[in-house]
Amino acid sequence: MDVITVIRTKRDRGRLSDEQIDWVVDAYTRGVVADEQMSALAMAILLNGMDRAEIARWTAAMIDSGERMDFSSLARPTADKHSTGGVGDKITLPLAPLVAACGAAVPQLSGRGLGHTGGTLDKLESIPGWRASLSTEEMLAVLGDTGAVICAAGDGLAPADKKLYALRDVTGTVEAIPLIASSIMSKKIAEGTGSLVLDVKVGSGAFMKSLADARELAATMVGLGTDHGVRTVALLTDMSVPLGLTAGNALEVRESVEVLAGGGPADVVELTLALAREMLAAAGLPDADPAKSLADGSAMDVWRRMIRAQGGDPDAALPTSREQHVIAAPATGVLTALDAYAVGVAAWRLGAGRARKEDSVQAGAGVEWHARPGDHVQEGTPLLTLHTDTPEKFPYAQEALEGAFSVSPEPTAFTAGPIVLDRIA
Ligand code: URA
């Protein structure tokens, strides 16, 4: 087998054979195929695609590159959720303890921020003392004791994806549907969850900008999960406007705790409940009532136990940024737009995300918006607050927000669309 033939096959729009796929994924993981060769192959895949059988084989090869976890010793059915990444997307934080409070076990192996999208682990690390890295034994103990665990995936899980993902991030090959689907599903299948709900984001703040692309990605992932015996459902959800009222690590933890306390922004509550119902149905618990578990405080109890079990103090004050800058509403009227991508880039530039993977993030940095599209705003009153420890970043963040919001004097200028755009099972 030689790598140049494999690259040429895909470059010339051919099909990769099972043997070629198994070999190239394994050889890349072992360092026999070089980064520049895998970059060329990833670009050929981005440009020329893969058929369903090729994607299935590629996914299987990535799963086989590492270990598989086993939750069969747990007394509860397992349910997991994966979001393809959005702005202000803190849903995992209230969702995992909520679904656990309803009777499922939620093993949530999460990631760090990527580009303009935030990462669950970065958010939780703003809680004093909280630890993302657990051994397999620690992870199973937290899951068994509290019903939910949110932690970093160990190095042994789909190592081919770890290497390939980092390469795609720096070679303009993130957006290939076969590579996104196999990347996400190889980790979820290797993790060993019994059921999985995918939150496929659509819109300016998502990797998939169009509904057609999001549908294709969702259908590909649902097919891969189902073929591997994981009950898999996807919701396509709107990411043209950021979720909730905050984007940034500690800011989003604060908002998640508000949701667990029975408050919080309506869109975050609505999406959390929609995903919880899907997870519980997929886990074989269709009669559980997540709205009740949110209202009666049982989800909050699980959250507190889960945070403590990973060294965090759920009562500690969350970090805040050293500096704030307010952007005022430019006119009186209805807010008609708030662009998710622009808000994500601004939060990232303020220090909530990384420019290089070895960078650290600022816990208090981010963007807070005081109105959502459809709300009435008054000229000169605060519309957005920017938070950072590095105030020299303010102009750079403000630049990202130019043209990102608009206000109309016409009261009927905005019609709200649904958050859940489609469901694929
Ligand atoms: N998340 C992943 O884990 N992989 C991708 O390729 C994109 C988003």
Image: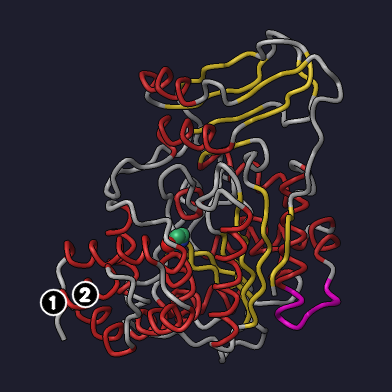
Which residue is tagged 1? 32
Residue visible at 56% across and 48% down? 209
Q: CA distance from mark 1 to mark 2?
A: 6 Å
Q: Position of residue 309 (x, y in %)?
A: 53, 65
Residue visible at 67% across and 59% down? 236
Taking the image as shown, residue 287 lies to the left or right of residue 1, namely right
Residue 319 counted in the magenta span: no
Q: Residues within 10 Å of mark 2 (few under 14, many from 20)?
A: some
Tell which of 7 and 61 is nearer to you.
7
Residue 263 position by quadrant: top right
Instruction: State the extent of the magenta-drawn residues as a range.
Output: 280-288
Q: Position of residue 50 (x, y in %)?
A: 41, 73
Q: Are marks 1 and 2 in contact (CB under 8 Å)?
A: yes
Q: Position of residue 163 (x, y in %)?
A: 27, 66
Above or below, comparing residue 323 to residue 343 in the picture: above
Which residue is tagged 2? 28
